[in-house]
Amino acid sequence: MPQIVKRAESLGTQVARVLRQRIVRGDLAPGTRLTEEALAEEFEVSRGPIRDALTQLSFENLVEIQRPRGVYIVGLTQDDVDQLYSLRGALEQLALSRAMRVDDDERWAAMQAAVERMAAAADAGDHAAFVTADLDFHSQIYALADHPRLEGAWSQYLPTFAALLEVTINHDEDLHESSGDHVTLMQVMRSGAPDEAAAVLAAHLDGARDRMLSEISAR
């Protein structure tokens, strides 16, 4: 069955998202060979968007482009997951330390809204909505940091972490515990000591990393 893409969004971005999800889920095993021709036929697009998608996935180290032989899936190893979360931890701890300086309640409204959306998604058992709200919550930490280059670094890796979260969150029948973790993190960011907030964030990210490592080990 052909993959249908939406014209309102960059075609390359859409193709990259679908392929990224397949790679992170393990549907495309390391070493699998892809061709632009086959992908263009599957997604019913020209080769231009396919090349854009593969270039992006190559930047993320999820595929290796070996022209003219083709494109090969690299996949995610446990070491890859460790690297991704150690990088995210370094970025997000810096963002958190800067965000905690913000006193303006209005600037925290977007994070509060994300927390409320996570709670609603948990009540409804809506995993897709929860993922979106979860990522919005963490993006707000970077927005509050007032550090455009730091926020830009997060944006580069956001699609990869979105795919990771989609894999791990779908193992949770009950999303309320995760929702509560974000409430705690926001509260400690607003009223706690910096060391306390850093510890809460570290535990939160370590848990996410460990869940993904368990997923890979089970394959």
Image (tube, helix red, strand yellow):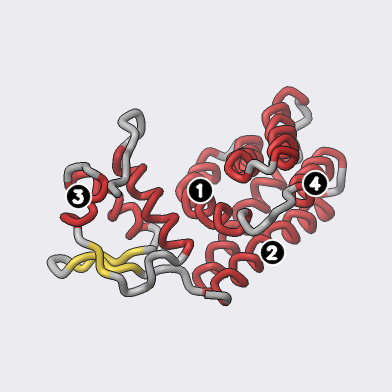
Query: Horizontal placement of 202 versus 190: left or right?
Result: left
Q: Which residue is mark 4?
A: 180
**Pointer 1 and pointer 3: residues touching (CB < 8 Å)?**
no
Q: CA distance from mark 2 to mark 4?
A: 16 Å
The mark that comes first in sequence, 1 or 4, is 1
Question: Which-is-in-front pick, marks 3 and 2?
Answer: 3
Q: Which residue is mark 1?
A: 158
Residue type marked 3: Glu
Residue shown at 30% from the left, 39% from the top: 11
The quarter of the picture where residue 124 lies is top right
Residue shown at 64% from the left, 51% from the top: 92
The mark that comes first in sequence, 4 or 3, is 3
Residue type marked 1: Leu
**Horizontal and vertical percent position of residue 174:** 74, 51
Which class describes the residues within 10 Å of circle 2: few (<14), some (14-19), or many (20+)?
Answer: some
Which residue is situated farthest in the top direction here? 106
The mark that comes first in sequence, 2 or 4, is 4
Which class describes the residues within 10 Å of circle 4: few (<14), some (14-19), or many (20+)?
Answer: some
- Per the rendering, the mark at residue 41 is 3
Q: CA distance from mark 1 to mark 2?
A: 17 Å
**Pointer 2 and pointer 4: residues touching (CB < 8 Å)?**
no
Q: Which residue is mark 2?
A: 206
Question: Which-is-in-front pick, marks 2 and 4?
Answer: 4
The mark that comes first in sequence, 1 or 2, is 1
- Which structural element holds mark 4? helix
Which class describes the residues within 10 Å of circle 1: few (<14), some (14-19), or many (20+)?
Answer: some
**Horizontal and vertical percent position of residue 121:** 69, 38
- Which structural element holds mark 1? helix
Pick the residue in front: 69 or 32.
32
- Which structural element holds mark 2? helix
Q: Against 130, is 72 above or below?
A: below
Which class describes the residues within 10 Å of circle 3: few (<14), some (14-19), or many (20+)?
Answer: few
